[in-house]
Each structure stands twice: as C-alpha cells, then as structure tokens.
Image (cartoon, grey):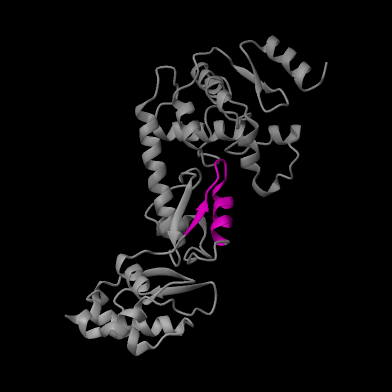
Amino acid sequence: MALLAFGAAGWWWVNQPLRLPAATVDLSVEPGTLPRAVVQAVADAGVEVDPGLLYAWFRLSGQGRQIKAGSYELETGITPRRLLSKLARGEESLRAVTLVEGWTFRQMRAALAKEESLKHDTAGLDDAAVMALIGRPGQHPEGRFFPDTYAYARGSTESHLLERALRAMDKRLQAAWAERSPQAAVKSPEEALILASIVEKETGRGSDRPLVSAVFNNRLRVGMPLQTDPTVIYGMGAAFNGNLRKIDLQTDTPWNTYTRPGLPPTPIAMPGKASLLAAVQPAPAKALYFVARGDGSSHFSESLDEHNRAVNKYQRGQ
C-alpha cells in the first residue's frame, strides 16, 4: 500500500540516476544515524536530490530502518532505489592493503600510515603501546602479523586491521605447528615463528625454503651457531647502511647469531605460510651450510670443505 501511495511518478523517480558531483562520492553513516539524517548526509555529500522526496522513499519503502552504519561509495548511475538497497544491505566500499612477506614491523606501520582511508589511531604510539592497544601488552611485535592482503572499510582503524593480522598469524602458526615433522629441532611454536622469519629473509625461492630450514634445524640440533646475516642486520637496526662488514658480524647484539648461540630472542620479520611450514618441515637433508649461487638459488653442503669450494665458485669466481 505504501508503494502505491508513492504513486507512478514517484516510482519513475526512484529508478532515475541521481546527479553526483564526481564519478564517485564517499558517504559515511555512523551507528545510530536515523533515516532523515542519512538523507541529509547524502545531500551534504553533494548529491543533487530533493531531501524530502528521498526521505519519503526511505519511509514508504519499509527499508529506511534497515540502513546499516558503514562507509559507502556512491557511483555514477546510482538511483534512489539502488542507493537504499546498498545502505540496507550494508554494501560498504572496501579498500585493501597488502602486508608483504619479509617486512619488519616498522615497514608494516609505515605502509599502514600511508593508507588514507584508515583511521590512524596508532599514530604517535611506540611499539609497546601499539601492542597494548591490540591486547598483547608486553609482547614484542616483530613477526606477530600474518602477511596477506586485507580488505577494510573506509574509516576502519589501524588497530582493528592489526588485530586481524595478529589473529591470522596465531591461526597460521598453530596450523603449521600441528604439522611439524620429526626432523624439526625447534621446540615450541615460538621457536618455529622465529626460525620461519629467518627462512623468510634468507631466501625467496620456494624450493630452497625446506633446505634452508634443514640447515638451521641441523645446526640447532648439533649446537652450531646459526651464523645467519639477516639476524645481524636486524640487530643493527638503523645503523645498517646496506653494507654488512666483518666488524658487524663480530659486534654483539641480542640478534647476532655469530656471537650468540641458538635462535635470536624474537622473529626478525613477518614470515609467510611457506616459511612457517618450512620451519617445522625441514627437508630430510644433512646439510649444515649453504651459499647463494647468484641466480636466486643456493648451493647446500654437508661439510665445511665442500662449502668452502662452493663459496670459491659462486662468490669468488675461482
């Protein structure tokens, strides 16, 4: 009956495209906003519409009270009918941000800070304060977030996105730990996460990950220092200028695996799924050494003599 009361002219109007001030218009509806205020927000956004007529449509359709809070994108060609449907269904406009495998927490925060559609509620907070804000007080942030592409609604907060990435890493790490093999020398999910971050930084070649993991698991098993450059670089922080020197390998930090035995105290980057699995499923190999061939792959050796020959061949051209 309500639609009949609206009349034929009104029905024609609800199916006519609205005039927008641009190709797309952003519309934000806060929780608890009444239909009349939503209509006003549409007009305030620059949409050429008769607020009284639009409000009448919202009321008579029976969907006005179903409008959901959120961030919406109104596109060219949208009609009053489509507008109300979008708002009632909660079809929010989504943005996406990609957290890259191997990024540090500092790099991730810098990427989020550039997302104009996010609310930067972590701006000005140090790392410890950020972790407290997302419910992990006292936990070191490095490596705790799963690298992936995350869709979010315009106006979402950085802290909410971080919480999602944090829960995703918890889930991925738990799943990987449940699939660990007898060859794994890591003794806990925490150790697996740390080792996975090292594997992530040591190679981007999928086929080499289990072998790189085997080297480090084998070294952990026999008590050999890991001696992995990425941990040294991480421990240097801002002091690293792109050139790793012998003195750097000899300068002790908590993350220097040349001067300290075992795994470093924290992860050194965000490991992806493949590195998490490699850390707990090392290849059944006896290798204790590896060296880059220069083509993205590595040569793996069981003895120091073989390793030295590989270094001469691939690094020194001898």
Percent x, y of residue 177: 38, 30
Percent x, y of residue 104: 57, 46
Quadrant showing the C terminus: top right
Q: Is residue 116 above or below residue 265?
A: below
Q: Is residue 200 above or below residue 87?
A: above
Q: Is residue 28 left or right of residue 55?
A: right
How many labels sit on residues?
0
Occupied quadrant, residue 56: bottom left
Q: Residue at image x 65%, y 39%? A: 233
Percent x, y of residue 49: 42, 85
Q: Residue at image x 33%, y 89%? A: 52
Q: Nearer the viewer, residue 54 or 186?
A: 54
Magenta-drawn stretch contains 188: no
Percent x, y of residue 140: 47, 47
Q: Nearer the viewer, residue 169 or 226?
A: 169
Q: Residue at image x 52%, y 65%? A: 123
Q: Residue at image x 74%, y 42%? A: 242
Q: Which residues are magenta?
A: 95-113
Does residue 35 appear anywhere in the picture? no
Residue found farthest to the left: 1
Q: Is residue 223 above or below residue 164?
A: above
Magenta-drawn stretch contains 97: yes
